[in-house]
Image (spheres, helix red, strand yellow):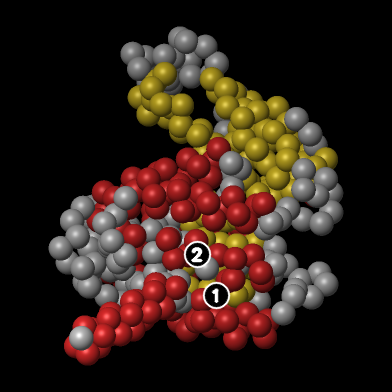
């Protein structure tokens, strides 16, 4: 009888410990003190929080001036997956009342740190975080999963690059449809043969974590987006395979003013007469979104073609370049 009671007590204590560990799955305690000390944003503060895993966690230590000079707040935790990001999103993002959250995701999901990888669930976690942020008046920047040819801590995981490419494509499309800026670290850091991260940008082999040079590349891509008064859900469009005699092609880009003052557009110019632009609203008030409708005439072209359209703002300054691609068939090149 005594033995049975002891066994029951041991089981109860084990269960209590297990549930306690489960409750701390997201590691809320990691930034609890820092969050409390931070307090509410000062008047006029444009607070930016970077959320992620070890790639985000190591960033302030590797490039401290990037965070100090810009007032950015790092909320990365090594080893975490998007499931854990979502659980701590209120504590480490919403409650800090930032103007912007930058979300980097995917590496540890694909590495199966918290179980078998399911692309649909990871994508759903990313979408949920974006929607939670926007519901709380926080602007969102989504960034690509970095290239990784494999994972040294989980070498049995196969097909890492294929999974990363697929997830990035789906997140990018979600960002485009929802007018959310998407920063593509992947293309800037992948090897020419597409098998992993460029060795010169990584601290490990296979490359997963950036070194100072890798973070410098990421900073050069992210900072212009955060500093721009205008945000674009996408800046490129591929019409795919088209018939050169099939008539004019059309696409609409959306432009949101994220500054605190009116922004005036003055026009747009394509790199040839076959590209035209129609600006729906020349003066965009803070928080408003305007449409930029573009048309391309593929007549006379053959093969893969890319055209560029430049948008000009107040002071006649170029504010954004747009890429328009198509693959024309059965015609001689112009």
Identify the element where label 2 is drawn: helix
Res 79 → quadrant: bottom left
Residue 312 x, y percent position in the rendering:
71, 43
Quarter that holds the N terminus: bottom left
Position of 141 with respect to 144 (left or right) is right
Nearer the observer, 246 or 172: 172
On the image, the x and y values in percent for residue 216 come to 47, 71
Q: Nearer the viewer, mark 1 or mark 2?
A: 2
Please, is residue 89 above or below residue 311 in the view? below
Q: Nearer the viewer, residue 75 or 142?
A: 75
Residue pictured at 47% horizontal, 40% vertical: 173
Q: Is residue 201 above or below residue 263?
A: below
Q: In the rendered picture of this protein, how many numbered marks are placed on residues?
A: 2
Q: Quadrant of the C terminus?
A: top left
**What residue is shown at x 50% (from left), y 81% (from top)?**
30
Q: Secondary structure at mark 1?
A: strand
Nearer to me, 9 or 259: 9
- Disc 2 crowd, CA 10 A, few/some/many (<14, 14-19, 20+): some
Residue 86 image offset from top left, x and y in percent: 50, 61
Q: Answer left or right for 51 relative to 209.
A: right
**Residue 63 seen from this side:** no
Relative to 87, say whether 54 is above or below.
below
Tell me the tag on residue 135: none
Q: Residue at x 51, y 81 (%)?
A: 29
The mark found on residue 74 in the picture is: 1
Query: Disc 2 designates what residue?
Result: 87
Figure quadrant of residue 197: bottom left
1 or 2: tag closer to the N-terminus? 1
How far apart marks 1 and 2 lie (CA) works out to 17 Å
Against 266, is 124 above or below?
below
Asked where in the image residue 42 lies, by quadrant, the reply is bottom right
State the residue at coordinates (48%, 73%).
76
């Amino acid at each position: 009888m005594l033995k049975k009671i002891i066994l029951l007590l041991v089981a109860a204590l084990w269960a209590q410990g297990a549930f306690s560990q489960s409750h701390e799955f997201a590691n809320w305690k990691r930034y609890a003190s820092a969050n409390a000390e931070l307090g509410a944003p000062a008047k006029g503060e444009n607070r930016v929080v970077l959320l992620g895993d070890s790639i985000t966690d190591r960033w302030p230590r590797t490039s401290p001036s990037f965070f100090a000079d810009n007032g950015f707040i790092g909320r990365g935790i090594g080893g975490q997956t998007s499931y854990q990001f979502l659980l701590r999103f209120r504590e480490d993002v919403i409650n800090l009342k930032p103007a912007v959250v930058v979300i980097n995701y995917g590496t540890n999901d694909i590495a199966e740190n918290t179980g078998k990888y399911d692309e649909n669930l990871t994508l759903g976690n990313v979408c949920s975080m974006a929607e939670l942020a926007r519901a709380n008046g926080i602007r969102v920047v989504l960034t690509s999963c970095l290239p990784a040819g494999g994972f040294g801590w989980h070498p049995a995981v196969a097909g890492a690059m294929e999974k990363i490419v697929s997830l990035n494509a789906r997140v990018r499309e979600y960002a485009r449809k929802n007018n959310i800026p998407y920063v593509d670290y992947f293309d800037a850091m992948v090897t020419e043969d597409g098998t992993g991260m460029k060795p010169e940008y990584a601290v490990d082999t296979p490359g997963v974590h950036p070194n100072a040079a890798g973070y410098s590349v990421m900073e050069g891509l992210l900072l212009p987006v955060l500093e721009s008064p205008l945000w674009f859900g996408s800046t490129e469009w591929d019409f795919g395979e088209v018939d050169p005699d099939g008539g004019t092609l059309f696409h609409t880009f959306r432009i949101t003013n994220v500054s605190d003052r009116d922004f005036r557009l003055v026009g747009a110019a394509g790199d040839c007469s076959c590209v035209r632009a129609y600006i729906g609203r020349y003066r965009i008030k803070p928080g408003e979104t305007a449409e930029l409708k573009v048309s391309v005439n593929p007549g006379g072209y053959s093969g893969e073609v890319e055209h560029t359209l430049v948008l000009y703002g107040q002071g006649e300054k170029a504010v954004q370049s747009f890429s328009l691609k198509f693959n024309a068939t059965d015609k001689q090149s112009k």
